[in-house]
Amino acid sequence: MRRLPTPAFVVLVLVAAFALLSLAVLGGTPAGTPAPVGQAGTASPSSPASGPPSSGEGSAGPSESAAASSSASPSASATPGPVGAVPIVPVVDFRSTITGIDVSDVKGVLAGTDSYWDTLELVKADADGILAALGVARPSSSAHFTTVSSAAALAKDLAADSSRLAFVRASQVTPAVRTVAWNGKSLFGVDRVTKTTSWPLVAHLPGDPHPFDASKTWTIVAGGDIMLDRGVY
């Protein structure tokens, strides 16, 4: 077995001792030596790491929680405004040839004597206000009067039964129904009134979230009723 000469062995021991002493002076820990408690690893109770969480981590303070709760709450949905004068308009089946009516037509429908319509239909939530605006009492019988839950349901009924006359808010008018004139005035069409205040038929109803504005409506006119997708020769 070969061994290092004694002088050489002494030199190596001195070099190793010097290296360990240097590491101790510099505050380092030799590789592989377990870290003392309170330095690396789990923090001791007196360590700053055990203090309150830094901003953006852990539990937020009361003011931060309140702000987060406020910003996370859903925005309120659009709700009707206070009761006011809301323009209403008579509507009929889209294919009807009738162009205008007056209160005598409404009374005839409710009495069962009208030659064209036999039922007056209204949206339930607005029925009392509209009847008051028309100057007629609420019928005690459903023989010639009915209500529905929404303007969309009303439009479907008109499309299925052309013998129904209806009234809706001007803001509820869609291409599914046809508006007609009231006492010679129209709210829609080429010869319509251009100011909402000029429309004579209004009911006292909860205000619309998006009120109808006659000055912002416009009309499309299409010539002819067949072959609208072909050229004209």
Image (tube, grey):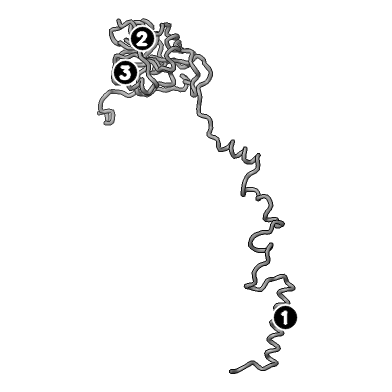
Give the quarter of the image for residue 101. Answer: top left
Q: Nearer the viewer, residue 81 or 33?
A: 33
Q: Provide the secondary structure element on which disc 2 rests.
A: strand
The kind of residue tagged 2 is Ile
Residue 147 picture location, percent across and down: 37, 16
Name the N-terminal-most of marks 3 and 1: 1
Say which residue appears at 36% left-offset and 24% top-offset.
175
Would you call the spot at circle 3 few (<14 residues within 10 Å), some (14-19), or many (20 or more)? many
Nearest-to-viewer mark from 2 and 1:
1
Residue 15 picture location, percent across and down: 70, 83
Q: Which mark is residue 159?
A: none
Q: Which mark is residue 18?
A: 1
Residue 130 picture location, percent across and down: 43, 12
Separation of residues labelled 2 and 3 (CA atoms): 14 Å
Would you call the spot at circle 1 few (<14 residues within 10 Å), some (14-19), or many (20 or more)? few
**Residue assigned mark 3:** 93
Q: Are marks 3 and 1 in contact (CB under 8 Å)?
A: no
Nearest-to-viewer mark from 3 and 1:
1
Position of residue 224 relative to residue 89, above or below, is below
Give the quarter of the image for residue 4. Answer: bottom right
**Residue assigned mark 2:** 101
Q: Residue furthest toward the right?
A: 25
